[in-house]
Amino acid sequence: MRPITRRVLALVVLLSVGLLALGALPSYLGTGDPYYLTAEETDASGPAVNVTDFSGQRYPYLSTALAEGRSEGYQKGPFGLKESFTHSPFDERDALTTQNPDAERDGRVLVEYDGTRYWVAVEQVQP
């Protein structure tokens, strides 16, 4: 094998391994106390986002919060790197706000799921 071919092949392998690591690395990064998406049942009136037919694959934090009251924890990355590559509860809250901007009040979003209304918010639980 020629030296130039060997170098190009080594560069391609290193680049592939680097991209794979970059895809996996953000899920392992995380600092500080975790953030949770919480859902509290409410009798509040007004405009709400209907999430009855939302996909659990697209909204994993929301579907867990509606089922259990609180989603799995999410830790922010140390330099803002993680947020660019991973899905977060902040993304889901922002997506709900985009669906119906009038449903957001004081950082919480009013949603309706199977006829029941919930306040959905991102909270950080301190130990």
Image (tube, helix red, strand yellow):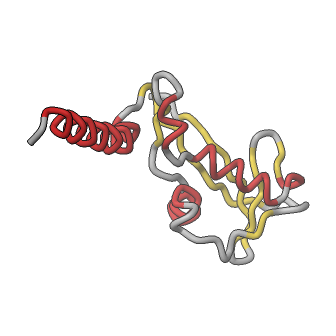
Q: Residue at x 56, y 64 (%)?
A: 58
Give the quadrant of the N terminus.
top left
| Residue at the farthest left position | 1
Residue 80 position (above or below residue 40): above
Q: What is the residue that sits farthest to the top in this orientation?
A: 79
Residue that appears at 74% across and 76% down: 115
| Relative horizontal placement of residue 4, taking residue 27 as reference (left or right) | left
* Residue 10 appears left or right of 30: left
Q: Along the line of sight, which residue is nearer the eye, 122 or 18?
A: 18
Residue 50 in percent (x, y) is at 76, 70
Locate residue 5 relative to residue 62 in the image: left or right: left
Q: Quadrant of residue 73?
A: top left
Residue 124 pos. (x, y %): 55, 34
- Residue 27: x %, y % from top left: 38, 41
Q: Nearer the viewer, residue 82 or 52?
A: 82
In the displayed orientation, state which residue is furthest to the front.
2
* Residue 93 in the image: above or below residue 57: above
Which of 124 and 96 lies nearest the eye of the viewer?
A: 96
- The residue that appears at 71% across and 54% down in the rendered structure is 95
Tally of numbered discs? 0
Screen quadrant of the C terminus: top left
Q: Is 96 on the left-hand or right-hand side of 59? A: right
